[in-house]
Amino acid sequence: MGNAVHDKDSQLVYLKERLNMFAQVIETIEPEEVDLEDIDRLINMLDELEQKCEQFKKN
């Protein structure tokens, strides 16, 4: 996923793939074993996804 994404269709595919990856991570987490570091990583993933959405909106 290191390639630049320029057209709207590719941007949408990129966002869907990232959202699916986030959902997979959430599904694999054991609630009893999650720690603060894990939660920070999840928040970071959401922040990055939000930044991409904003970046794509401006294009």
Image (cartoon, grey):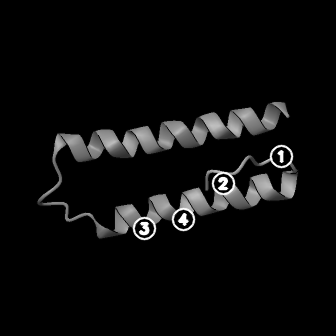
For the point 57% across and 43% down, the residue is 49
Amino acid under label 4? Asn
Which label sits on residue 24?
3
| Closest to the observer, 26 or 55 | 55
**CB of mark 3 within 8 Å of CB of mark 1?**
no
For the point 74% across and 46% down, the residue is 4
Front of the two marks 1 and 4: 1
Real-space CA distance between mark 3 and mark 2, rounded to the nearest whole angstrom = 14 Å
Front of the two marks 2 and 1: 1
| Closest to the observer, 1 or 59 | 1
**CB of mark 4 within 8 Å of CB of mark 3?**
yes
Amino acid under label 2? Leu
Q: Which residue is mark 4?
A: 20
For the point 61% across and 56% down, the residue is 1
10 relative to 47, above or below = below
Amino acid under label 3? Gln
Which percent across, then down, holds residue 41? Answer: 33, 43
14 relative to 49, above or below = below
| Mark found first going from the N terminus, 3 or 1 | 1
For the point 70% across and 33% down, the residue is 54
Q: Which residue is mark 1?
A: 6
| Closest to the observer, 24 or 32 | 24
